[in-house]
Amino acid sequence: MNDQKCELIENIGKLHTTEMGVDRIKKNLSLDVDNVVTWCRGKIQNPNATILRKGKNWYIHIDACEITVNASSYTIITAHKLKRN
């Protein structure tokens, strides 16, 4: 596990989002879940997830979607489906 991925996983309990973030993530991923943060935590902790830090954000790729998390506040900013080539 690389250091960046380890840092995010070690602080997974700090992960949160805003009300607007919940709505945006549900809409972008067509999710019908009660707790978006719990859903995102599960995806981030999946051993198949690829976690990269670019600047102030982490980008998590898993199951044809990308989750964007602010690296300093642990706020889930958005998530969206990845386009297939």
Image: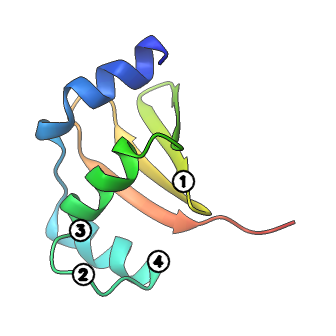
C-alpha gap between disc 4 and disc 1: 15 Å
Give the secondary structure at mark 4.
Answer: helix
Pick out the residue farthest to the right.
85
Give the secondary structure at mark 3.
Answer: helix
Which is more N-terminal, label 2 or label 4?
4
Q: Which residue is mark 1?
A: 62
Which is more N-terminal, label 1 or label 4?
4
Residue at (16, 80) in percent of width and height:
34
Q: Position of residue 11 (x, y in %)?
A: 19, 28
Q: Which residue is mark 4?
A: 28
Q: Which residue is mark 2?
A: 33
C-alpha gap between disc 4 and disc 2: 13 Å
Q: Position of residue 1 (x, y in %)?
A: 47, 18
Which is more N-terminal, label 1 or label 3?
3
Mark 3, residues whose alpha carbon is within 10 Å: few (<14), some, or many (≥20)? some
Res. 36 mark:
3
| Identity, as a three-letter code, of the amino acid under mark 4 | Asn
| Identity, as a three-letter code, of the amino acid under mark 2 | Val
Which is more N-terminal, label 4 or label 3?
4
